[in-house]
Amino acid sequence: MALFFGLLFGIFLGPETGIVDKTTADLITEWLSIPANLFLKIIQMIIIPLIFASIIRGLTSSGSIEQLQKIGLSAAVYFVVTTAIALTIGIIVVTTIEPGSFIDSSLLRESFELENLEPVENYELTIHDIPQGIIGIIPGNPLSSFLSGEMLSIIVFALIIGVSMISLPKQSSQPILDLLESIQKITMKVVSWAMRLAPFAAFGLIAGITSKVGLSALTGLGAYMITVVIGLAMMMLVYMLIIKVFSKRPLFATFKMMKDPQLLAFSTSSSAAVMPLSIKTAEEQMKIKPKVSQFIIPLGATINMDGTALYQIVAVFFLAQLFSIDLSFTTILLITLTALAASIGAPSAPGTGIVILSTILIAAGIPPVGVVLLLGVDRILDMTRTMVNVTGDLTACLFFDNRIKDDIEIEPE
């Protein structure tokens, strides 16, 4: 309801009605964005200790190195496979629909005032950067990673600490585990306070977007938006297949349980913001084992970005079609690998997808100025792809919960 009324109020403030001048509308939306900014600030404030504590507790709850190897390696393979499926769906959809051929580039440039815009600074991405990037994942100074919010380095550090704690006698690691459990409970309590702001945050966000973009600005990029949404819908069908075939759960009842995390993901465009609610939903409603939910969901919120990967590949092909750039097979392969790596390392915060997209565009030889063409509608698509990302994390939980249950049943026999 907050999203709906925010949309109506945004139209009222927008350029179509002409009732409110632009300066006044900007001032109103700036005040309306206060709950949203407070909500996201609170989440950002506690998300690092929550992820750190959740991953270590999730690892140690597995009980043994053997069980950890079974879950960890399987999770890595699962996330790579689903991301590859998302990229494949994106390529098929965008090459079939060809949304770039329906849009007049000159009209878009005029509406977004791009005539005199200078291209952004060019950063070369080569195969020589890969070894250094792999080394950079290991935090040389964990405190620096915590302060700068380098989520992938923090997760790697938590994984190393968690594995080492499993190797120690239980009495040696128990005091740290008790401390981490207290940290996790404290952060979840803070999240429950932040959740009270969520409806007001959703209202302010959608009102601000609609008032600035306007409905007429969305129509020019309609083909691109529809292509992305179709691709994301197809990815949801893949999740349904996993839930039905591999997890053996009823689809309607399962998606009904996922409703709250999905709506919050759609409202906030942040997988990190939804992570606490996803864990709560997985454990309390979907009856997933804590050792699965507290390991898969924090890990998935950072490296399982199927919706983001699909959106990025569609955006690159769309802009290539718009600028009449032919993509060779080698270029498509490079784009795919870059999108895979970028989606895995993408921060789970609003708006980061459009930033990462610039790197992929440069790898494809597409003018980075094309990113500006997508900014107007990116927030709406960000909301949709984040909902898919969160659904993917919960689906992964169901997949591994069922797998671990089967393993436990077999072992006594």
Image (cartoon, rainbow, N blue to C red):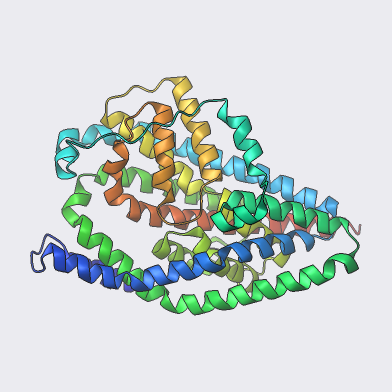
Lateral position of residue 73 relative to residue 37, left or right: right
Lateral position of residue 19 relative to residue 199, left or right: left
Q: Is residue 246 visible?
A: no
Query: Which one is nearer the viewer's eye here, 9 or 54?
Result: 54
The residue that appears at 37% across and 48% down in the rendered structure is 229
Rendering coords of residue 1 (x, y %): 33, 74
The residue that appears at 52% across and 57% down in the rendered structure is 391
Query: Which one is nearer the viewer's eye here, 325 or 171?
Result: 171
The residue that appears at 33% across and 73% down in the rendered structure is 2
Q: Is residue 403 visible?
A: yes
Number of marks: 0
Query: Which one is nearer the viewer's eye here, 107 or 100?
Result: 107
The answer to which image quadrant residue 314 occupies is top left
Rendering coords of residue 309 (x, y %): 48, 42
The C terminus - image quarter: bottom right
The answer to which image quadrant residue 345 occupies is top right
Rendering coords of residue 398 (x, y %): 64, 59
Lateral position of residue 120 relative to residue 147, left or right: left
The residue that appears at 47% across and 54% down in the rendered structure is 388
